[in-house]
Image: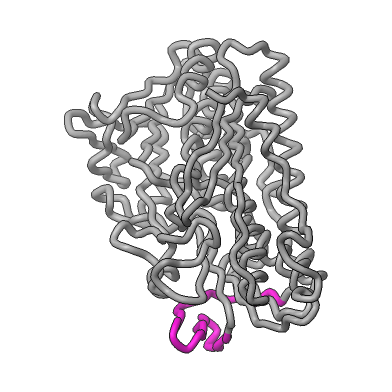
Amino acid sequence: MTSRRDVLAGLGAFSLTSAWLPRPAVARNRASIAIIGGGFGGASAAMTLRTVLPDAKITLIEPNPTYTACPFSNLVIAGLRSLDQQVFSYDGLRSQGIEVVATRATDVDPTQRVIETEAGTQISYDRLILSPGVDLIWDAIEGYDQSATQRMPHAWKAGSQTTLLRDQLRATEDGGVVVMSVPAAPYRCPPGPYERASLIAHYLKTEKPRSKLIILDAKDSFSKQALFEETWETLYPGMIDWRPGSFDGRVTRVDANAGTVFTDFETLTPAVSNIIPPQRAAEIAMRAGVTDSTGWCPINAQTFASTLQPNIYVIGDATIAAPMPKSAFAANAQGKICALQIARDLAGLPPAPSVLSNTCYSHAAPEAAFSISGVYGTDGGIFSSRAGGTSDLGASADMRAREALEAVDWYSAVTKEAFG
């Protein structure tokens, strides 16, 4: 097993050198490149394209006027952070000459290379990057539709759902039970539900110490499991009851009006229900013809080009990129590499070899965090794991505190890189 020190040594950002793109090729290209989705992947791709193709027309299509980040939003749910700290403007992209079109992309014609928008306009492209994120699959759990989210929030897309879940936790009486459901993989941010469970447990321990949390999990194992379980036993003994899929952990039905959650063998009526449903690539990816029967987008790992449609690239949570996880760190790295490979393609150059990395930090408490890291090769257009590691079990409080500070530094760096 590669040591954690070795893994972290390989996680530096790549440099935009002539090995990637000769300077003459940079200067003369005036291609039109459209990007759908203004999250970590799309914004990072736009910024990198502006650097390597200063004469290109770059258009980012995003319906939301600002971006509300999911990383660190579990701290908002636990009352440890303001939602305002999660919101980022697109003014930094505009200042770099990137056109930000505030509308929703509704369709893509890959043959004509045209995007239809909700505003009734058409946007043409030479190359298209899709970074659309995920859609929640309504009714995958019987009774859980969009209207049910007002009683049983998912909070898996940061914003009003985040504060709704926070406010429900605040309103519940001491001694109330909180239920969280976790879907089968794949879904956005594999460790995210368990970080949320830890921080909800912190809130309950601090404010409502007679309460408890039940995690109903469709899976039998999860990311960073040993680290989370060690934390739960140490910091929140008796407060978290994790029930795996093989032990009646799968939620089969909900009744939002009655506040009930059903498994195969049990009916629960908790004070708060956080239902995280299954997910798939956002609808625009399907409309563009880049999803397969799984609902996700197959890609060439070296270039991020869709294997189903020409001149379209897919990055971020919508991709099939296993073993690389669906995370903000991954989306940022993929956006940068994808932009560089597009620049090479437009210059008539072959794809360049690349190695990508990912680090996911999880807060176990306000000043305690741990992480999992990986390094991934893209040989033959297929992702492969080259190295990986996690934080040490049994680490001191000081070590966990240092990782919490590392998480803050990473968040500051990645948001600045993506949004300016």
* Residue closer to the observer: 261 or 197: 197
Q: Is residue 5 left or right of residue 280?
A: right
Q: Nearer the viewer, residue 241 or 98?
A: 98
Q: Position of residue 365 (x, y in %)?
A: 62, 23
> Would residue 155 be seen by someone viewing this image from the given angle?
no
What residue is at 56 percent from the left and 14 percent from the top?
Answer: 393
| x then y, percent, for residue 154 | 44, 46
Rendered image coloring scheme = one colour
| 186 lies above or below 227 | below
Q: Is residue 278 left or right of residue 245?
A: right
Is residue 181 magenta-colored?
A: no
Q: Residue at x 62, y 25 (%)?
A: 4
The x, y position of residue 326, in whole percent, is 50, 47
Q: Is residue 143 visible?
A: yes
The residue furthest left is 265
Which image quarter: residue 347? bottom right
Classify residue 244 by image quadrant: top left
Residue at 33% from the left image edge and 31% from the top image edge: 216
Rendered residue at 52%/88% (across/down):
120
Residue span colored magenta: 99-124
Please tell me in which quadrant of the rendered image residue 372 appears: top right
